[in-house]
Image: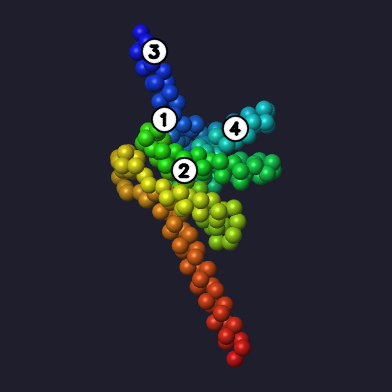
Amino acid sequence: MKNSYLFILASLLWASVSSAGLLYNYSQLTLKDLDQMNEMAQKKLKEFKKDGSVENLKEAVQAIYSRPNDDGMVEKVISPLRTELDEHELWETTMDGLVQEAIGALKNPKAFKPVVQNTYAIFLENVIADFKPFAERPGHERKVIQTIRDAKIELSKEAINERKLRTMSNHKSPSEIATQVMNNISKMEADAKKAEEEAAKKAKK
């Protein structure tokens, strides 16, 4: 009887940990269309305005960025949530917290099912893609991408295999993607500096 109780308790704990704090995994989110994602976002906005719990907005933001963005849906759905968080000066802290949650999960893969690991990986991939245009200048977006780069995330074999099964393609880790983005920005800055120096030399002649 005692062993049965311990087994049930362990199963409940595993279910809790393996699904983390996600509303949906990326596979479930892929099936949701624009109307369904907007409906989810609006529902969480209403709940926030009713009880003031930022957790409602945080869950919605996490879900939106965790959906594969092949159809460019992130930018179509995220705006009202970002506006609300910006008005309360909570956007940056919310994103920082969610990024750290994703990094923590991916650095501890044994605690999470492969589909959950990939949900967090897609979250970070979409954050990088969304922040990339603004990372060309110093600011929050650049710091977030640098944080993902410096985390040195390595995807587990289980996560890689699970995603290959669904998408039939290889995927770089979020840290590798962030490294490439920052390398490109560094090169762009170096080229711009060189061009300025050459222009200054010509001006002196």
Residue drawn 59% across the image and 33% down it: 55
Q: Can residue 180 be seen in this view?
A: yes
Could you tell me if the residues under marks 2 and 1 are in contact, i.e. CB atoms within 8 Å?
Answer: no
Give the numbered dot on residue 56.
4
* 76 versus 36 height, above or below: below
**Camera-nearest label, 2 or 4:** 2
Instruction: Name the residue beneath numbered marker 1.
Output: 18
Q: Is residue 62 left or right of residue 14?
A: right
Q: In this view, does 101 lie to the left or right of 27?
A: right
Amino acid bearing label 2: Ile
Q: Position of residue 187 (x, y in %)?
A: 47, 68
Residue drawn 48% across the image and 50% down it: 148
Amino acid bearing label 3: Tyr
The N terminus - image quarter: top left
Quarter location, residue 118: top left
* 32 versus 175 height, above or below: above
Q: Earlier in the sequence, mark 2 or mark 4?
A: 4
**Cα–Cα span, label 1 and label 3:** 20 Å
